[in-house]
Every structure is written in C-alpha cells, then in structure tokens.
Image (cartoon, helix red, strand yellow):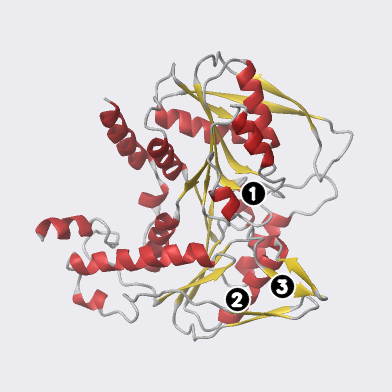
Amino acid sequence: MPEEKAKAKQYFTYDQYGDNIMVPVGPLIVIPIGASKFCEQVNAWLYDRRQAYFTGGANREILQEPGFLRENYLMLPRNLRLETGEGRIHLINTVRGHDVFIVCDVMNYSETYEFYGSEKAITPDEHYQDLKRIILACSGKARRINVIMPFLYESRQHRKNGRESLDAAYMLEELQNLGVNNVITFDAHDPRVANAVPLLSFESIPTTYQTLKRLCKSYPDLEFKRDKLMIISPDEGGVDRAMYYASMLGLDFAAFYKRRDYSQVVNGRNPIIAHEFLGDNVENMDILIVDDMISSGDSMLDIGRELKKRKAGRIFCAATFGLFTSGLERFDQAHAEGICDAVLTSNLIYLPPELLAKPWFCQVDCSKFVALLIDALNHDSSLGALVDQTQKIDRLLAKYNKKAN
C-alpha cells in the first residue's frame, strides 16, 4: 500500500510551494463537438486519474469536492439543425458553477445533417460555429470556459499575403471576446499566431513523446544512431520541429524545400515543381519524416521517392494530424512499392475506420495526455511538466536502448 500511495502521489497537483494539493476550480464537465468517441476515451482516463487521488490518500476536503470523482464527466449537447443549414445548441444539463472544457474536432467530416433534402457533411466552418454556440450557451453560467481544439481552425491561414483574410488570428480574437479563458491546441501550424491574443492563455503542445513511444513499440529493431537513422523536414516551415526531434534523439537532420510555380494557383495553392534536398548521404539509413499534418500526402510521398532514389532504407512518415484529403489509395500504392513503410498520426482528430485497418498505419493515442491536461487545468496548475517532454523522451530512450541491448 505505501508503494501505491507513493506512485499515486506523483500525479497529485500541488500548489506553487509543493505543500498542498490544489482544490479544483469547479466541478468538471467535458463537452465534445465532433469528438464524441475521442472524449469517451478521455473520460475513462479522467476517472482513472481521479481514483489515484483516493488511493494516494489525498486530503479529505479535496475528495469531497462536488463532482470530483464520478464515472462520467461528459455532457453531450443537443445539436439541432434545420434543413436550411441553420443550427442551434441546447445544453441538456446545467453548467452553472462548472469548469467547462469544450473539445472541438473541426476536422470530423463523418458527422452529417439534412440540407434541403440531401445529406451534407459538417465542415470545419460549421463545427467552429457550433463551438461558438456552446460558448454562448455556457456564458454567464459556467465558472470558466476552456477550449481544446486539437487541429487549430484555419491554422494554415496564419499570415496575410496581399488582399486576403487573416482567419486564424481573428478566430482567436473572437474566442477571447466570447469569454474563453484557455485555448489548448496541438502542434499549431505556426504557434506565433498566439501573438494576435497576448492576453489569452494559449498553448500549442507537441506530441513528440507520444509519437516516439508508438514508433518504438511498433518497430523495436529501430536503432537511434547517427549512421542508422536520420530525421527529415519535408519543407522549410518544419525545420524547428525536425531539429527538436534530432536534438532529443542525438541524430542528424536534413530538409527539403519546395520549388513552386507562383504564376498559377491550383486547389488554392501554388503547385510544387520539385522538392530540393538539403542534406547528407542517406544510403541504407532509415528515415523519419516529421511534419505537423498530412493533407493530401503528395509532398510526403514525393519526398519518399526522392529518398529512395538516394538508396534510403525504411521510410517512416510521422505527423500530428492525418487528413488524407485525397484518399488512401496513393499510400496503399506507395506502401506496396516500398516507398513508405509506415505512417504515424494521432487520434486527436477523426480517423476513418478504413484508415485504421490499413497495414501501414500506426495510430498515436493521445487520449490519456489530453485527460492529464484537463485534470491539471481543472486544478489551475502549471502545465510545464506536461508540455516539456524532454525528460519523458529521455526515459523512453533509456528504456528502449536497455531492451535493445
């Protein structure tokens, strides 16, 4: 029993002096928007985490906080939508005095509604509008409103070029004006978008540790040595991310840059003419390509082909978000040709069943991580230990190398 208490104690959320376990801001409620299945996993982890307080012998006054430990922290909103596309949100229970966490997956295209007699998939614009509706329904009643938006809405429209909108910055300003206290996202396309709202608590959290943990589990023969594995950024925008991976793993990194045709626009972007490689010899080396998202996947697969021309070994593609907007067939073909051995993406956004069934796909589970973040925020505690993944990666590699030896 003392060992169990000691193990549970590491999960407690203490005040800044390390003396007392912090009292929650208010009873916890999690409201999903397009993230019901993911939030069910988060809810289970929240229950397990709260039980650790009991087994660790936390102060009685903490355990007696209203709603501190219960099997279900979820509240599913009633999303009512007319056939014209107009919608409204109805909360089935009160949120007065509660600490509300809204988990919004704007990329869940599996949810539909009737629109003038035909079925229409809910778009990111409509998910975001539903988010604002829930905030309005909670405003003036909830003790605090927190938004967890794994894929930051309009994050790729993060800077203004000429006569165009600056949507990501305006979205954050809008959430701030609606009274949101905290915004949590993961691996934002450009974290500097937070500069638009300097008074808003905004966190862009990496999933490096979770990705490496999944990679080590799936490929125990992988060798983290300079002459065996290389980290590669698919473009200049992801260099910082690749450098972090390489620094933590003690590996070399290289990068590609995209040579584009700026004289035309295809599917909303300037088409890529070629991927130019900036790096050392990759012959017989395993490759880990890291990025924030896989959209169509064209860039990743083109880079894979370029690396294979240079006689690279296995190629692993890792991204926080797998959108696969052009389907999965090209990845099936690339896997069959030996261009891509595995693709790793998180379950922070919707993943279709056909993707989960692919032999080349590895799901990175982040539900426990999100539960830990919610619990820490509910206690108004620092997120530093959760956000800084350096020590966890060091422990993971030490454990992995010990098994390998």
Callout in the foreground (3, 1): 3
Q: Secondary structure at mark 1?
A: loop
Left or right: where does residue 137 sit relative to residue 8?
Answer: right
Disc 2 packing (10 Å; few <14; some 14–19; many ≥20):
many
Disc 2: which residue: 134
Structural crowding at the residue carrying mark 3, measured as other residues with C-alpha within 10 Å and reported as few (<14), some (14–19) or many (≥20): some
Q: What label sits on residue 113 in the rendered view?
A: 3
Q: Mark 1 sits on what residue?
A: 323
Q: What is the quadrant of the N terminus in the image?
A: bottom left
Instruction: Depth check: give the residue in front, 329 or 59.
Output: 329
221 lies above or below 93: above
Whole-angstrom CA distance, mark 2 to mark 1, is 25 Å
Q: Which one is closest to the eye, mark 2 or mark 1?
A: 1
Which numbered disc flags the more N-terminal residue, 3 or 1?
3
* Mark 3 to mark 1 CA distance (whole Å): 21 Å
Rendering coords of residue 330 (x, y %) = 68, 37
Element at badge 3? Answer: strand
Residue kind at label 3, given as amino acid type: Tyr
User: Do the residues bearing badges 2 and 1 touch, measured as CB atoms within 8 Å?
Assistant: no
